[in-house]
Amino acid sequence: MNVVPDTSAVVDGRVSERVADGTYEGATVLVPEAVVGELESQANDGLESGWDGLSELKRLADLADEGTIELRYVGERADGDARSHAHEGDVDALIRDIAADHDATLLSSDIVQAEVARAKGIDVEYVEPVARGVVDELPIQEFFTDETMSVHLKTGTKPKAKRGALGEMRYEIIDEEPTSEAQMDEWATAIVDLARQSNEGFIELSDDGMDIVQFRNYRIAVARPPFADGIEVTAVRPIAKTTLDDYEFADELRERFKERKRGVLISGSPGAGKSTFAQAVAEFLNDSDYAVKTMEKPRDLQVGPEITQYGALGGEMENTADSLLLVRPDYTIYDEVRKTNDFEVFSDMRMAGVGMVGVVHASRAIDALQRLVGRVELGMIPQIVDTVVYIEAGEVHTVYDVTTEVKVPAGLTAEDLARPVIQVSNFETGRPEYEIYTFNRQVVTVPLNDEDGEGESETGVGRIAKQEIEREIRSVAHGHVDVELRGNDEAVVYVSEGDIGTVIGKGGGRISDIENRLGIEIDVRTHDEKPEDSRGTGAGSRGAAGGGDGRGGQVGEERGTVVQPEITSRHVVIDVDDGVGETVEVRADGEYLFTATVGRGGEVQVSRGSAIAEELEDAIDRKRTVTVVPAR
């Protein structure tokens, strides 16, 4: 009897097993060289299957020495291309050809290989594959108690766990004996194999050095070298199952969700209970006769079977979104909205009319909304997100209502400063707490209450206005700058005596331009005019001017280095070549323009739209010679 085992049969030890039970006693075992090459390749890659297969070949050699079987190696080794395409069937085809050429029985644990061989008229013996290292239960189950949220295991360290109630988690040692590498390898292999073999688990992600496993309600990350510096297993599970009734504002939130399709961000710090709340929302919407789906990577929300959980199709959430639009859900729960791509997908689905509930990491409720700024058009934010729910210690801490209105921002008075303003209001009190709008070409988020207790002139728009005034004046002043607010629409700026003319500008044009842009009346004075009780270097003492000597106009006799500024869409860039971190003066035809610090890239960048950028661009347009000299 001639027998040709394929790779799967050798790895599973099926040949020696059949020799032992007498089935193959006296048989001639023809081992293809292609099988030997594949096992060698797997062993070199550190795969356990490769080593198991080589051990089986050694057992067959021992049986041949005893005279129990005849062992021969036949055929040619597969080349590198064939081995790299083994999953496409190249090596299997070589093995089938050998079985056919020797009129032998093909022994295989690969169902596809067996069926193809039968179709080609080859005699086949198929045996079930060995469930390698598979156990019925999670091998690290013993570390979980009723209050355990996560278990953290790593080679050479003591096992740890996060235990306690939501908001009161303790990261503690749960075993005083450090875990050996052999034990970690056994656990890691058993967990991955369990997920592959069990109907209750699956592999969410598998890459070199990292496997993400979902088994029942456990999400387990298995990391190995070289991706990690040691074998590490992190297992997480939810410790609470809630309904919407368990939370504050339950009645109001129910009505809000049912009123119309909403765009909601559920925010909070890690472990605060965001996903638990999202699950409660998903179950409520499903019970309210809405078609609900989820988008997760990995899929670990604990929801009922009526709610289909989708992963990243082809590794991309955009593909999942395209598919979901064909499914037409009423609401989609998007777990872990983190990267710009996630926010874009969330926004696209929301604008397509799908109700969206996104889970976002944030340390404050307003921070969740700010993560949209810069990722989508400012005016679109209220259409994408109209509700922000902030979770803290498993409870609903804050709910914000997000709307938009064309108005003069709070704290400003000039009617011509009216613009679209996003109002973020406390859902419970109805009182606006933040405003988001464009101020002096920048998007600002302005708190409407005194969070720092510094008095009315330093709150909200006052702080933003002071920062903008300082920035504008520093861009043209040589010495330090102090700004003192006198209400919401008036300020006094103190500069060096030599800077008065430069700051005011010819005929008052420069300071008028700043006043019109900011909507604030500015009185320019010298530091000597500042009241005795408020003198000092002030917040502006480290301004961009740097020199601090009040020079204006023509500065020094140095010729300096001639440069060719480059105008981009957002900056005017001066390449200084070297002198990173040095302070330099920029001049046009020898006339002082401004002082700046050379950045890490050997460049000086000036934001377009600022006063100094306009002067620099004017100098370039007039073909004046621009030079850079070290600041004195």
Image (tube, rainbow, N blue to C red):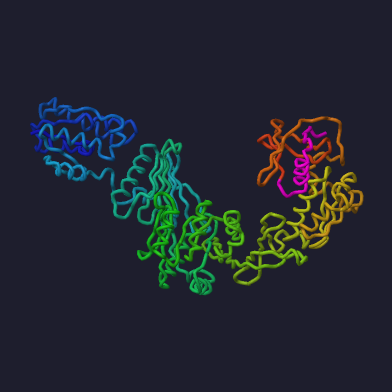
Task: Tell me: residue 528, above or below residue 348.
Answer: above
Any part of residue 303 in sight: yes
Q: In which image quadrant can residue 284 be found?
A: bottom left
Q: Is residue 577 left or right of residue 101?
A: right
| Residue sitting at the far top | 65
Q: Indicate the position of residue 532 as horizontal and vertical percent values.
A: 91, 52
Quadrant of the image containing the C terminus: top right
Q: Is residue 468 left or right of residue 497?
A: left
Q: Indicate the position of residue 556 as horizontal and vertical percent values.
A: 86, 33
Q: In which image quadrant can residue 60 be found?
A: top left
Task: Tell me: residue 350, above or below residue 311.
Answer: below
Q: Nearer the viewer, residue 63 or 547?
A: 547
Q: In which image quadrant can residue 68 be found?
A: top left
Q: Indicate the position of residue 608 as horizontal and vertical percent values.
A: 71, 47
Number of numbered discs present? 0
Q: Is residue 303 left or right of residue 495?
A: left
Residue 95 is a magenta residue: no
Q: Nearer the viewer, residue 399 or 179?
A: 399
Q: Nearer the viewer, residue 538 or 182?
A: 538
Q: Is residue 296 left or right of residue 134?
A: right
Span shown in magenta:
607-632
Any part of residue 61 in sight: no
